[in-house]
Amino acid sequence: MFQADKEKCIGCGDCAKVCPVKAISIEDDKAVVSDKCVDCGRCAQVCPVGAIYPVAVKPQNFYPGPGQGFPFSPFGAGGGQGRGMGRGRGMGRGPRAGRGGGRGGGKR
């Protein structure tokens, strides 16, 4: 979501002209960004005075689900050796894991 700074805005309307979803209107010679904004950023690129800027949206009432944790938390996913995938010999060893190297030899 983007927002317009009412003090910086000069009401030129360039932002409203480039908005692909018509989320910006000019009211009282100032830009107003509606909830239809799709965060494309075109308005901020064309504003000659830098009056339009992105607003960080913080999730409210966020509770991590299974396997998720808060950043830099000592609890939750990761951070330990765990038990692996249950295949016994580890991962990434190829199709012949534990049955020889598979390189040459054969029966003589």
Image (cartoon, rainbow, N blue to C red):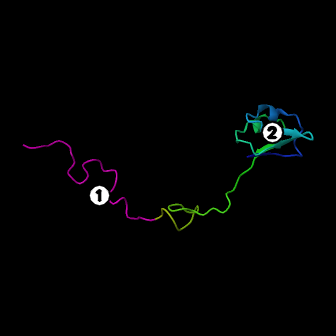
Q: Measured along the vertical axis of the image, is residue 74 above or below residue 26?
A: below
Q: Measured along the vertical axis of the image, is residue 90 above or below residue 49?
A: below
Question: Which residue in the structure is indicated by mark 1?
Answer: 89
Residue lying farthest bottom? 75
Work out whether residue 75 or residue 1 is closer to the camera in this orientation and state it: 1
Query: Around disc 1, counting alpha carbons within 10 Å, would you say few (fewer than 14), some (14 to 19), or many (20 or more)?
Result: few
Residue lying farthest right? 28
Q: Is residue 42 left or right of residue 30?
A: left
Whether residue 96 appears in magenta in the rendering, the answer is yes
Tag 1: amino acid:
Arg
- The x, y position of residue 40, in whole percent, is 70, 38
Residue at screen point 76% across, 35% down = 19
- The residue stretch that appears in magenta: 80-108
Q: Magenta stretch mostly in which secondary structure? A: loop
> What's the mark number on residue 101?
none
The part of the image, by quadrant, that contains residue 23 is: top right
- The x, y position of residue 82, in whole percent, is 41, 65
- The x, y position of residue 79, in whole percent, is 48, 64
Work out whether residue 88 or residue 22 is closer to the camera in this orientation and state it: 22
Task: Measure the C-alpha gap from mark 2 to mark 1.
Answer: 59 Å
Is label 2 in contact with label 1 (beta carbons under 8 Å)? no
- The x, y position of residue 66, in whole percent, is 51, 62
Question: Which residue in the structure is indicated by mark 2?
Answer: 24
SS label for mark 2: strand
